[in-house]
Amino acid sequence: MVGGAEIELVNRARATGATITHVEGEQLERALTTRTPQPIVAVAPVLDATAAGVAERARETGLPVVVLGGVSDPGNAGTVIRSAAAAGAAGVLLTQGSVDPMNPKCVRATAGALFALPVAMVDDLAALGLTTVGAVAGGLSPDEVDLSGPVALVLGAEAAGLPEGELFDTEVALPLDGGVESLNVAMAATVLLYEARRQRQGGSW
């Protein structure tokens, strides 16, 4: 059932020149991957991004880049993209072995951020020309690391961690109490992104 909010959204879309097509609920379910989809679905282009372009944007804006190394869970990757857009990042890069950012679950987890933030795959971190900050189990506290500029925040999957043999300019670790061994990668990325924002803002969010 379409309510007032959905009708308003349709009217706003129509005002921009978007093509509006009405379909039955059964048709919508067959076209999508969710069992109970939202009553409104949009088809929109994503930003045409490359790793080199994201790195250049970081240098121009002074914003960090998030690099996901082998993060295969679409919900985690999508949440990181959403947090990166919210906290102010130049973009998100994913290494080989990571989930396809166009995965439907990943797209949903971004809550629309995928259409506003450059996201691309990356093969060679060194080629980016950015200072790399690896999130590891034993590193400096985030407030001891300069995150105020165009750095590459590199995070791995919770179970596997960062790729073996990868060298970073600096290593950072979030303090953990209560016997907790690690944080979900999306949570860790969000904390680091907001610490970077705090540093850029001169000590306040």
Image: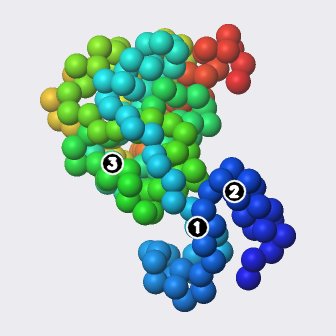
Amino acid identity at mark 3: Val
Amino acid identity at mark 1: Val
> Of 121 and 173, which appears nearest the observer?
121
Which residue is disc 3 drawn over? 71
Relative to 71, residue 127 above or below? above
Categorize mark 3 by other alpha carbons within 10 Å: few (<14), some (14-19), many (20+). many
Which residue is disc 1 drawn over? 41
Q: CA distance from mark 3 to mark 1?
A: 27 Å
Relative to 88, residue 183 above or below? below
Residue 126, quarter of the rendered image: top left
Determine the residue positioned at 45% across, 46% down: 46
Between discs 3 and 2, the one toward the N terminus: 2
Q: CA distance from mark 2 to mark 1?
A: 11 Å
Which residue is disc 2 drawn over? 13
> Of 55 and 68, which appears nearest the observer?
55
Residue 62: x percent and y percent?
A: 51, 13
Determine the residue positioned at 29% across, 48% down: 98
Amino acid identity at mark 2: Ala
Q: CA distance from mark 3 to mark 2?
A: 34 Å
| Disc number placed over residue 112 in the picture, else none | none
Secondary element at tag 3: loop
Asked whether disc 2 touches disc 1, contact meaning CB atoms under 8 Å apart, the reply is no
Residue 177: x percent and y percent?
A: 53, 39
